[in-house]
Image (cartoon, grey):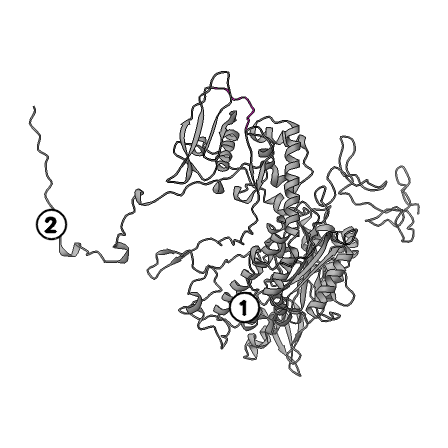
Amino acid sequence: MSPRKKSKRRPKRKRDDADVTPPESTAADVTPPETTAADVTPPELTPGHALMLYRDEVVPLEQRSSFNFDEDGEDCDVVDDEDCDEIGYEAAGEEEREDEHGNPEDLNEEEDLNPEAVGDDEEVVGLGVEEEVCNDFEAEFGADVRVEEDETDADSGDDMFDDEKIPPPMSESENEDEDNGRRENVQAEDPEALLYLGKTFSSPSDFKIVVLRYSLKTRYDIKLYRSQSMRIGAKCADKDVGCEWRCYCAYEKKEQRLRVNVFTAKHICVRSGYTHMLKRGTIAWLFADRLRKNPRITKQEMVSEIKREYNLEVSEEQCSKAKTIVKRESRASHQEKFSRIWDYQAEILRSNKGSVFEIETIPGPAIGNMQRFYRLFMCFKSQKDSWKNTCRPIIGIDGAFLKWDIKGHLLAAVGRDGDNRIVPIAWAVVEIENDDNWDWFMRLLSSTLGLNDGRDMAVISDKQSVKVEHRQCAKHIMDNWKRDSHDMELQRLFWRIARSYTTGQYAKHMEALQKFNPGAYTSLLSTNPMTWSRAFFKVGTCCNDNLNNLSESFNRTIRQARRKPLLELLEDIRQQCMVRNEKRHIIACRLRTRFTKRAHTEIEKMIEGSQFCIRRMARHNKHEVELHDEKYSVDMDKLTCGCIKWQMTGIPCVHAASVIIAKKQKVEDYVSEWYTTRMWQLTYADGIEPVQGKMEWPRMNRLGVLPPPWRKGNPGRPPNHARRKSRYEAKTSTTSTTMSRKNRVMTCGNCKQDGHNRLSCSNPTVEDQPKRPRGRPRKDQV
């Protein structure tokens, strides 16, 4: 054995005391006790957490009806889940903060993510401070409240304070959330994670669901060879080669669950493209959601869909029976929900005194027969009082399709609070959106709110009213107007016209449009600009809205609720309003500025823009203000400006702000009371009271109500039944020999103007210009 070599050691370097820096003792140096893997119990994967493969979207199994299917595919027992899902608000996303040492600090899960909520330790910012603040708020609710910064119910598309932003075009599809938000299929799962030795199940039905998922994923032919309450097993159905794949579960008394005791995972067979697990019950379970959205899916389409998604073969007869199962269970579910509508009405009126809940039905053909649902109207007292006492006199109304499998529309009236957020006032469910139902809805809304003739308020909708100021949504007007043109300059000119505050600005921009495109100018005049241009709006509402974003924002918040049956729909809307009111009440109580956040931002913007104004004094407290070669008169006694923006919004414009600052006064003293924090607190001072569950609803013992007629297809015109075009209507397609006239502008042969033809022309005839003679022109003879 060779002797071990000695390693050479380097001489130690002498260290000075100055080189040694003693470590600082911080809280970060304290190491918490380590958590071992044995201390952590992994959560069990139950079928409620499982996801199924769907073409349209990912749907949790807990939200679907559970079909108990047996070996031979007999009639399936259905277990319906009648519990109403609570409204879940998505977190706005975690942000990072820096501590006093400059290190990033993660927000706690319960911290307030909204900059509106200002703590007591922070510096008071703003133009002024209200005298009364909820001092005991933090003692009651705690210092941290989680609030979303980008709430879906916040009117994100509002351009009331942003005249430079061009709103995005409206979607032409009624199913915008389905077209734009179509989810992808579940990513490939590992089959070994679905079934393994020792896995437990709470019931035989859960085991069948997992075996079905395994069969759909692997495409092996699996069947159940034993199905009992205490024992259940599945095996490979290939008898030719004697495949040994098998999975057997037995009940364990200690765990009180079914456990996989035998599992042979290896297949020696070849995939056959067929599985015994895919029967009519499971097909109905797979297509239940899609058939509810679109009852017109044919059995042939279901066969091809299963072939495309799973590469498995099923028969048309199986798909036809699956459709029957879905339709039968869906009808039974709807009838059960509608049968308790009187009990739900009694519970709402009991828990929320002073609310309005009207239900209209169609009597049966004979005395004692069940009546059919026609329409209903709901308005909670807290929502009504909030709008009447603390909100500006403007209402946006609109209708939306209910995406269930029976006929239905939702009509809603929405207001705007001091922070420019939506305040749902009332809503109604009707069978169809027509003039009769709109008149009925507006009559009930007017009587509930005490509007009388409505002379001092404005309504944004596509329904005309006699005495109420009617405003149309400029975004819808623009989308319909430039449907055949994609010129961005037309869009810019349109929004300059829509956002003109004076008739002079309106005439200037209309003249520019006429020079740019005479045909577009003519067609725009036919849209009645007095209903969507701010130059013709009444003064007094303190709102310059010419977009119906109020209703659009409300419809976005209930897009998931619109897929549910009637009572679940009404409960979701009520719960959203109840939670929204309480969250905003918390924010308003913590807000210490004199005005709301958005109003405060606009006031600061006007003050900043006033530096470019040139002010000249005049008599009687009047001033002439010049900005960008435009002059306007400001009357401080009447609180008016020639640009009309001050009167229209209730916040001093840049011209008025320059005068107020020059007089050494405060701009906030001239802002409307609608934008104060005190008014915003009063808006959400009273909230919607909670209601009891279905089991505790009072039993009215009234004659049951049948649901509306069953819808045979999707709402709107079927895509394969196109409207027949008229003789002179433009073609919509281009062939190999002819070009489409869809994007071409016709010229009248009678008056020589663009936009119409000779048949519809009412203008005087214009003589044709004489044609130039043929040949070379002769020289002038002297």
SS at mark 2? Answer: loop
- Is residue 128 visible from the viewing direction of this image? yes
- Is residue 463 visible from the viewing direction of this image? no
Of badges 1 and 2, nearer the viewer stands: 1
Near-viewer residue (119 or 525): 119
Q: Please tell me whether residue 749 is drawn above or below residue 736 in the rendered image.
A: below
Location of residue 655 by image quarter: bottom right
Q: CA distance from mark 1 to mark 2?
A: 66 Å
Residue at position x 50%, y 74% from top?
Answer: 128
Instruction: Specify the amino acid type for callout 1.
Output: Thr
Residue at position x 74%, y 71% from top?
Answer: 452
- Is residue 270 inside the magenta stretch? yes
Disc 2 target residue: 14
Percent of width and height locating residue 75 = 61, 34
Q: Please tell me whether residue 551 is drawn above or below residue 335 in the rendered image.
A: below
Viewed as shown, does residue 722 lie left or right of 17?
right
Disc on res. 504: none
Q: Main secondary structure of the magenta part?
A: loop
Near-viewer residue (398 or 293): 293
Disc 1 target residue: 596
Near-viewer residue (206 or 316): 206
- Is residue 73 inside the magenta stretch? no
Instruction: Specify the amino acid type for callout 2.
Output: Lys
Percent of width and height locating residue 509 = 72, 59
**First in residue order: circle 1 vs circle 2:** 2
Q: Which span of residues is magenta-colored?
A: 269-276
Q: Residues within 10 Å of mark 2 (few under 14, many from 20)?
A: few
